[in-house]
Image (cartoon, rainbow, N blue to C red):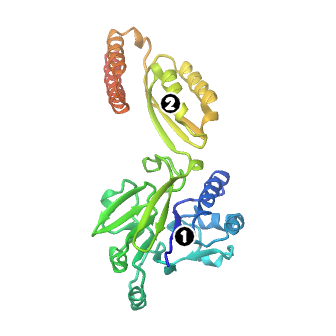
Amino acid sequence: NFIMTKILIAADLHLSIAEKSYSFSVFDEILENAKNYDALFLLGDTFNTFEDAEKLKEEFSKKSEIYNKNIYLLKGNHEYLKSGGINLSKLKFADNIKIIENIDFINLDNLDILAVAFSENYNIDNDFLKRVENLKERNRIFLGHGIVEGTLWAIEENEESAFIPIEIIKRVKPNLAIVGHIHKQMEINIENINIIYIGSARVWRKSKSEMGARKCLALNIDCDSITKNYIDLKSAGEYRVYNLNINDIDLKIENIYKNWNYKDIIDINIYGIIEDEILFENKKKEIINKYSKYAREINIKSANLFFLENAYNENIIKEFLNVTEEFESKSVDDEYLEIVELAKYIGIEKISLALQNKK
């Protein structure tokens, strides 16, 4: 008989008391998507700390019970935080939530799954080897939380712990290895294994790895193959960073805010030369008041601003800005504009320092 197994996978939701409403709104969207699938797998750091798990387990369970299918919850390194050595499985969750704290083998119709929770010490023993030998399905996947040994070169984040030995994955001979822990979504091939870092399901911290759409991963498994499809999580929003010149900031923001989601976190790094600090503070308030309703959070940073009295009476500044405006008017795409913006920033920094030294 033809069997199609469908599973949904997400990771690093970091449900927390501090951001309860936002983080649960992302979980709600994941559950809504999961209605069309046979099971939901959460690949670690579902809770930001063990304390968050304790305080949020009832609300998490109520939402999960409505889903009415199994949710497999791998323990991540964040479920260890503030745990005092208590295992996650000691907490009372809904019956359809299956906690995986070590290594587990799961069979779903035509799919064998090896699920490996975060550990500081992985062990391939005889029991593990025997269970691998008994796997019968042609379709196999590895699910885990950590950094797969040998892939650290591809990772931009400052993560040095949670290594998963490649040998554990190779033993299973999986079609795919899907891993939580790294917040940037990416795919890597190593030793003929397709490794997918699924990325964080929501924006947890302001870093490069949190930029871009947050996603979950859908797998459709038939008798011969596994097909994958990423699903954007709209409620997660995005972390967006802009470097804008003080001279044309109003025009630039007016063009970019239309792309924002009200769940986005926006960081605006303002650079350039300004003559009056009070006027700048007023400008910051004006921007936040006008655009805060379009994003979850707007931060304006001024570390790259130079305060110089009567700066715009200097011919060199006027000439430089005229030249950069001419280049901007000829821009053909976003990449070209970014290069012009960077050149403008570097030029203004050099001119400002030269003028300060002169005075």
Q: Which residue is mark 2?
A: 256
Q: Is residue 235 left or right of residue 59?
A: left
Dot 1 lies on which element?
loop
| Point 39% across, 8% down: residue | 313
Q: Is residue 3 left or right of residue 187?
A: right
Q: Is residue 56 left or right of residue 81?
A: right
Instruction: Determine which quarter of the picture holds residue 71.
Output: bottom right
| Point 43% across, 50% down: residue | 209
Q: Residue 30, percent across and down? A: 59, 58
**Mark 1 closeness class: few <14, some 14–19, many ≥20 residues within 10 Å:** many
Task: Choose between 18 and 63: the one closer to the eye.
Answer: 63
Dot 2 lies on which element?
helix
Quarter of the image that includes the C terminus: top left
**Mark 2 closeness class: few <14, some 14–19, many ≥20 residues within 10 Å:** few
Task: Choose between 53 and 40: the one closer to the eye.
Answer: 40
Q: Amino acid at mark 2?
A: Ile
Q: Amino acid at mark 1?
A: Tyr
| Point 64% across, 51% down: residue | 22
Query: Is residue 156 depicted above or below 60 in this figure?
Result: above
Q: Is residue 43 visible?
A: no
Task: Choose between 112 and 209: the one closer to the eye.
Answer: 112
Q: Is residue 70 visible?
A: yes
Q: Which residue is mark 1?
A: 80
Q: Residue 302, percent across and down? A: 48, 30
Q: Is residue 265 left or right of residue 92?
A: left
Query: Is residue 27 depicted above or below 172 in this figure?
Result: above
| Label 2 – label 1 distance at C-alpha | 40 Å
